[in-house]
Image: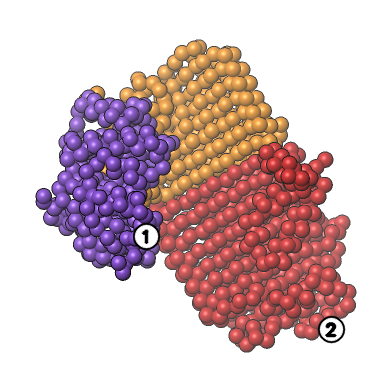
Chain colours: A red, B orange, C purple
Amino acid sequence: MKEKTQIGDIDRSLYDFRYEENEGDFLDSGITPEIISEISDEKNDPDWMREFRQKSLSIYNRTPMVSWGPDISGLDVDRIVTYIRQKSRMNTDWESVPEDIRQTFEKLGIPQAERESLAGVGAQYDSELVYHNVRREVAESGVVYTDLESAMHDPKYAELIRSHFMKLVPPTDHKFAALHGAVWSGGSFVYVPKNVHLDIPLQSYFRLNAKGAGQFEHTLIILEEGSYLHFIEGCSAPKYYEAGLHAGCVELYVGKGATLRYSTIENWSKNMYNLNTKRALVQENGRIEWVSGSFGSHVSYLYPMSILNGHGASAEFTGITFAGEGQNLDTGAKMIHNAPETSSYMNTKSISKSGGISTFRSAVVVNENAAGSKSSVNCESLMLDGISRSDTVPAMDIKTDKCDVGHEARIGRISDEAIFYLTSRGLSEEDARAMIVRGFADNVSKELPLEYAMEMNNLIGLEMHGSIG
Amino acid sequence: MQMEKTMLNILPVPTFSWLGVNGSEHTVKQYETAYISADDGIARLDVQEGSSYKLSVAENQRSTVILYNNSDSSTSFEVNVSAADGSDVKLVEVFDSKAETVTKVRAELGTRARFSLVQLYLGGSGTVSEIAVEQGARSEFTADIAYELRGKDRLDLNLLTEQSGRKSTSRIDVRGVLSGEAFKIFKGTIDFKSGASGAKGEEREDVLMLGGSAVNKTVPLILCAEEDVEGSHGASIGRVDEKQVFYMRSRGIPEDKILALLAQSRTDRVIRLIGDSVTEQRIKASLGRGEEDE
Amino acid sequence: MSELLRIAGLSVSAEDKELLHGVSLSIGEGETHVIMGHNGAGKSTLGCTVMGSPEYTVTGGKIYFDGEDITELSADKRARLGIFLSFQNPVEIPGITLSEFLRNALEQVTGTRIKLWDFKKKLAAAMELLDMDSAYAERELNVGFSGGEKKKAEILQLLMLRPRLAILDETDSGLDVDAVKTVSKGIEEYRKSVGGSLMIITHNARLLENLSLDRTHILSEGQVVKEGDGALAFEVLENGFEAYVRKDS
C-alpha cells in the first residue's frame, strides 16, 4: 500500500468545514549527499546500500509533509544530529561494554533480564549496537539475531537483506520513511528458519541518549514457514531540552503458517517526535500479533500495518495509549485484507489527562480479492479531565460484499458510581482512579510478559499520581 | 448563475490521504434564498434548482417540512434551519433523482430545541450531501437516514454535529444497501465541544452489501474535548447475517426473496418514519411497492 | 398412524466436532414426542438439523419427511413441506415488521397471496389468543422484544403458518408461569385446529402437563440412550436424568 501524501496546511483548524488548499510546509532537510556519503563510509555500506541511501535522500527532499495528523512544526530536522558517531565497537561480552553505557543498561535491568528470561538481547546506545548476544542454543536452532550492518556483510544473509530491506516500507511511502532510508543506522536482523519455535522471547532495548539525537534504527524480521517468534521491543529516552526525533522502521515478513508476536512498550521522553513506521506482510495462514503501549513522546504517529496477503492470514492488534500533559499521541493500526478468508481484530484503549491529546486512527481495507474475510474493531477512550482531548478517527474501506466488518467505539469518563464504590471500601480517590485506569488498560497488560506488565502498571501509577487537583 | 469550484464534504479531522475520504472538489452554484413557512404544520415542497431554503421556527413552535427532489437534471440546493428555543422541527428530504445532486443542510438548535432529520436516498448518479448541525443546551438531534444504491449510483454523505450545549443529545442512524457498482462514503462526526457537560451522542451505520462490485467507505468520528460526555459509534458492514437468513428460510421464504426483503427493510424503516401518507405513497409509487389490496 | 418424520442413523457435526452420533427416531402423523437430556446432549442440534440449519453438517444418516428424503433440502423448502421450528433464541431482524414478515412467509408456505384484510383479521385473532399487544404486529421482528414476547411471537407464527410438524426448542425456557400458560394455550390451539405433530425439546414439566404425550426420547452425549411412552417424560423430570443416561443400563 502506498501512502500518497497530499499537499495541505497542517495547521488547519480541526473544525473548519471549508477547505483551503495551501502549499504544504516542506521541511528543509539540511542533509546533504556528502553527509549521507560519510555515513556510508563509516558503515562500510555495500554499493547497493550507498545508492539506496542517496536515492532515499532525493525522495526525502521532494516529498511534502503529511497533510493530516498532529502538528510537527516544532520539529527542526536541521538541528537534529542524524548520526551519532559510534561510541564503541560491537561487543559480545557484557563486561567489555564501556562503563557509563553499561551502567545505563544495568539501571534498565537489561543484562539481568537477559540472564533470567530472554533468549537474546540487542541493546542500542544512540546509533550503534553496543552489545549483542544470542544464546548458544538459540543460535544452534538456526535462528539468527544480529545487527543489520553485520548481517549485510555476511554472505549468508546479504542477498536476503537486499531483497527485503525497505521493500515493505519503501522510501516513497512518506517523508520520514525516505529520511529513514537515507540515514538509518543500527537495529536488528532476525531470521527464524522453517518450523523453528522459539519459546522464549527475543528482546531489543532501544535508548536515545545524546542531546537532540535522532534515532533511525531498522528492524527486519523474517519468519520462515511454520515458525514462531515473540519479539519484544522496549524504548525509553531521558528528557532533554531540544526536541528529539525517532523515525525508526520495522519490517516483518511472516511466512506461511508462521506466527509472530511483536510487543512494544514505548516510553520516549516527553520532547520526542516519534514518527515510527511498522509493517507486517503475512502469508497463507500466517499470523501477526501486535501488542503496543504508547506512553512517552511529545508527538507520536504510530499505526502498525498488517498486510494479509495469503489465504487465511490473520492479524491482531492490542494497544493502549496514555497521553498526559504536553503530549499529542496519534496512534492506531491499519489492516489490509488482500486475500480470501483473512481476519483482523483490533482492540485499543486510549486515555487522555492533564491536557494531553490522544487520537485513535485506523484503517480497515477489505479488497475485492478478500471474499470471506472478517474484521472487528473495538476502541475505547477515557477522558480523565475537562482540559484534555480524545478523538476517534477510524475508517473502513470495503470492496467486497462477502465479508463481515464490525466496528464499535465508546468514549466516556470514570463514573462517579465506580469512584464512590471504591472509596466506600476505603480507597483514596486517587488510588480508586488509578485502579480503574489500570483495569481499563487490562487488555494490554494481560498480553505482556510479566515484567513488562509490571513496568506498564508502574508507568500508569506514575502518570496517575497527583491526578486530582 | 455563478459557479465556483470548492472542496465539499471535508472530513473535520483529515486522515490517511490514500483512503480518499478527506473531501472532494465540486462545482457549486450560487443560491437564491427561498423562505419556507410551516408554522405549526406540514409543508410539502418539490425542490427547486438553485434554492437556498430558509426555515425559521419560532420558540416552542412545531414544524414539519418535506422536500422531494425528483428532478431529471442536476440539482443544487441547501436548507438552513434555525430552530429557536423549545421548538420542534422535522425535516424530511427524499432524493428520488437519477441525476447529480449537491446539497447541504445547516441547522442551529436553540436551548431545548428538537431537530429530527429524515433522509432517503433512492439512487442518483452522484449525490453530494452535507449536514452540519450546531446544538445548544439540552437540544436533541436525531438523524435517520437510509439509502438504496445500485448500478453506478454514487453517494457522498458527510454529517457533523457540534455539541456545544450542556446535556445536548444526538442519535445518528444510517442504514443502506449497496449493489451493482454503487459507491458510497458516509462520514459521520460527533464533536463534543468543551463545556458540553452531560452531552450524549451515538452513531450507527449498517451497510448491507449485495453482490456486485460495490464499494463502501464508512468513517465514523467522535471528537471530544469534554470529560463528562458519553459517546459511541458502531458500524456493521458486509453480507447478510447467516442467522437471519436461516430464520427467514425456516419460515419458507427463499433466499432471493429474503435478500430483497432485507434490502427493502432499510428504506422501509425510514419511509415509515416520514409519517406522512401522501409522501409515503409517492415514494412507494416511485419504487413500485404499492399495497395492491389495502 | 402413518409416519411423518423419520430420522435414520443421523450423525451431525459443527465446527469439526461431532455432536450427534447415529440418532434414529420417528414421529407419526399427529403424534407428540418429547426430547429430553442434559445441556449439550444434542437436543437443539437435532431440532436445528431437522429444520436444515447451515450451522450443522450432516455427516451420516438421513432425514425423511412424509417419505421424502429431505437431508439435502434447504430450510425454506422444508418449511414449505410443512416443518416448523420454534427457535430457542429467535434472531432480531431490524427493518421488517412482524406482520410484513408473516404475510410474506404465509404467501410462500401456502403459495397464494392472502388478502390483506383477511390476513389482518387472522393475525389479530391469533394475537389475542396469545395475549399479545396488537402493536407488536407493526414492530420490527423480534427487535427489542422481551424473552417472553419473542417466544410468543414464535407461537404466533406457528398458529399462522399451520405446519404439519412443529419442533419446539425450549420454547418454555426463561418464561414466567403466566407466559408458560399462554404458550401452552397456543400449542393446544395448534393441536386442535391443525392436528399436526409435535417434537418438544424441554426439561420442564409445565409445558407438558396439558398435552397427551405419545413418546419420550432421552439424549445423552449425542445418542438416544432411552426411549419410552409419554409417562417416561414425567418419570425423568421427577427422578433426574442420571438413572437413564448410563449407557450400560
For mark 1, name the chain: C
Mark 1 lies on residue: C242
Residue A279: image tag: none
Q: Where is residue A11 in the image (x, y as percent from the top left)?
A: 71, 44
The disc numbered 2 marks a residue on which chain? A
Type of amino acid under label 1: Glu
Where residue A242 sits: x, y (%)?
A: 85, 57
Residue A96 circle label: 2
In this view of the protein, can residue A183 be seen by the observer?
no
Horizontal relation, residue B247 to residue A167: left or right: left
Q: Which residue is nearer to you in this view: C134 or B129?
A: C134
**Res A277 quadrant in image:** bottom right
Q: Identify the element where label 2 is drawn.
A: helix
Q: How crowded is mark 1: few (under 14 residues within 10 Å), some or many (20 or more)?
A: few
Question: What's the residue at 57%, 78% (across, down)?
Answer: A197
Give the label, 2 or 1, closer to the camera.
1
Find numbered disc 1 in the image and state the secondary structure of the residue it sits on: helix
Instruction: Identify which residue, A189 or C102, lies in the foreground.
Output: C102
Q: Nearer the viewer, residue B208 or C146?
A: C146
Q: Which residue is drawn at 47% across and 37% down?
A: B174
Q: Residue furthest left?
A: C1
Three-letter amino acid code at disc 2? Ser
Callout 2 touching callout 1 (CB < 8 Å): no
Q: Do labels 2 and 1 share a chain?
A: no
Up-down relation of residue B19 to residue C21 (above or below): above
Quadrant including the C terminus of chain C: bottom left
Residue displayed at 37% across by 38% down: C150
Residue C191 coordinates in the image, percent (x, y): 20, 39
Position above or below: A361 against A338: above
Q: How crowded is mark 2: few (under 14 residues within 10 Å), some or many (20 or more)?
A: some
Label 2 to label 1, Cα distance in Å?
Answer: 72 Å
Q: In this view, does A82 lie to the left or right of C157?
A: right
